[in-house]
Amino acid sequence: MDEKQVKQVLHNLIRNSSDAMNGKGTISFRSSLKDNVYNLYITDTGNGIPEFMIGDIFNPFATSKETGTGLGLTIVQRIIENHKGRIELLSSSDEGTTFCISLPLPLKKD
């Protein structure tokens, strides 16, 4: 994995979560390992993604922020896909949002 790119992914997701919470709330991380796939769950207690935007959140220039570029989640998705993984929006409501990043782990050589 490219360490700088993974940092960029986390930076973008944390920044989005922080913006959604207006500086108040919680961002939590949890992970699991299943069938040689590492899953990282990022959850915030923000206002959620507006329903009309949910289908477009990974599209370039899609944003609900007045000052946003709409490139953060597009970049996140491309980086994760370049690492043979995927990112998906698991849930979003006025109580918060959860994303899951799934990355395959290299097989151990005997």
Image (tube, grey):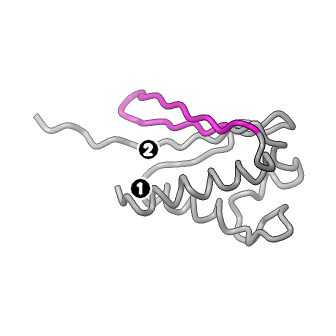
Residue closer to the observer: 57 or 96 = 96
Please report the bounds of the magenta region as a residue range: 25-43
Quarter that holds the C terminus: top left
In this view, the residue in front, 8 or 88, is 8
Residue ID at (78%, 42%): 24
Disc 1 is placed on an element classified as loop
Percent x, y of residue 45: 76, 36
Q: Which residue is at 65% across, 59% downward?
A: 73
Front in this rendered view, residue 94 or 53: 94
Label 1 crowd bin: few (<14), some (14–19), many (20+), radius 10 Å: some
Q: Position of residue 18 (x, y in %)?
A: 71, 50
Q: Residue at x 76, y 54 (%)?
A: 19
Compare marks 2 and 1 and give the one earlier in the sequence: 1
Residue 103: which numbered mark, if any? 2
Instruction: Tell me the distance, in whole angstroms, between the alpha carbons under discs 2 and 1.
Output: 7 Å
Is 21 located above or below residue 11 in the figure?
above
Residue found at the far left of this picture? 110
Residue ID for mark 1? 83
Magenta-drawn stretch, dominant element (helix, strand or loop): strand
